[in-house]
Amino acid sequence: MKNNIKQRLKNPDIGYVTIDGSGVVTSCNDLAANILNTSAEQIIHRKLLEILSTDKRFRTLAERLYTPLSALKNEQFNLPDFRKGYKDSITIRIVKFPDARGKTQGAYIGLIDYSGAVTTRVMALNSIAEGVFTVDQEMKITSFNEAAERMTGWTQDEVLGRQCKAVFKANICTGSCAVSNSIMNNCNICYDRDIYITRKDGTSFPVSISATPLIDTQNRIVGGVETFRDISESVKSDLIINAVADGVVTFDDKGVITSFNTGAQDITGWKESEIVGRSCDEIFFGADGVSACPIMEASRGEPCNIINQDGYVTDKDGYNIPISVSITAVLDAENRAIGCVQTFRDNTDALQKKLILDSIADGVFTVDRNWRITSFNLAAERITGWERDEAIGSYCSDVFHSSICGKNCAIAESL
């Protein structure tokens, strides 16, 4: 413990700001607020770029934030002549927070002040929802934030000075350790998607992690920092979706495929890795000139949903498989479509039965137990004058008006 404090005393003070996917500040410590010439209360819930744009000293950092957050890089750079008399007195360190698929959902921005008085280095990251811990070069834990305590059941006092692998017992705590690799290889960030760590009570849970080295005043690596986020709900959703026999595919607002479940792979023969990133209209198309591509179209300000639309999907061998498609919009907080979920099932058997029925000269129709018509062949259309689309869903008595409708119904007697 004392050695850890001595190590921290050798390092400069660190201010930090965290931002969400929109560039809005979600947390900020007092040192960062002082460096930004404001207060923590005034910076929280504001866009960081708005604050930086009023101070020319932060021009280099502001230029990074002008790009979309998805294009933000994990990097470290100096702000020259930030403080008069101190060359390169401020170093900026950017670490992105990726989600389960590696998409940036926010970022940590460290402001390392080399000109201030040497004090204990405290990374006050308790306001961050992700678990955060730091280690020294011996992989011993030197800090452990409140979110890490909540997720793991360990307290900071219990884990300080212990090797992280003895605490987490993760499935990557050997040669593929993210923190160790970031320290050994001096990489900006190391990311692993499917990681399981163990809680204090012995249970394990999946997390999404990122790791990066810690640098001292001489730009030497003195340890590492790792963030982790509980993805249990996401994993449960994936397991449920992959257990569904129907095909399930998700799209973004541009119609680009973002996921493809096991059922979809079984129906089409395509692997998820071969499909994700492709446009929907490369794979899906509609019957009778009706588009099956679920790019959202607004109707009276609300996205449209589709239920059981006939369409086709192209399998890996190039054949068109008839499918029944349902599409549901995914909405943001302002009720705007940001993508959609499409379910589909192989309609080959149903189509074959329909073709057989349509080839029969006699009129044939089927009903459910509520006496609503569920199928109506071509001969039935010719004999009755009813169109199939008009008949299906109607009560059979409303279509036929037969003298035996009611107590003498032939179908009722057969049932």
Image: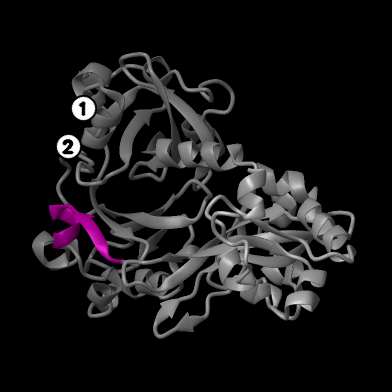
| Closest to the observer, 311 or 88 | 311
Residue 27 highlighted magenta (yes or no): yes
Q: Looking at the picture, does residue 359 appear above or below residue 265?
A: below
Quadrant of the snapshot with the N terminus:
top left
Residue 315 visible? The answer is no
Q: Which residue is mark 1?
A: 5
Q: Amino acid at mark 1?
A: Ile
Residue at 75% over, 73% down: 287
Task: Report the side of 266 relative to 326 (left or right).
Answer: right
Question: Which residues, given as a range, are shown in magenta?
Answer: 24-34
Q: Looking at the picture, does residue 348 appear above or below residue 22?
A: above
Task: Report the side of 396 relative to 283 (left or right).
Answer: left
> Label 2 near label 1: C-beta < 8 Å?
yes
Quadrant of the snapshot with the C terminus:
top right
Residue 201 highlighted magenta (yes or no): no
Q: Which residue is mark 2?
A: 120
What is the crowding at mark 1: few (fewer than 14 residues within 10 Å), some, or many (at least 20)?
few
Give residue 305's mark: none
What is the crowding at mark 2: few (fewer than 14 residues within 10 Å), some, or many (at least 20)?
some
Residue 109 sits in quarter: bottom left
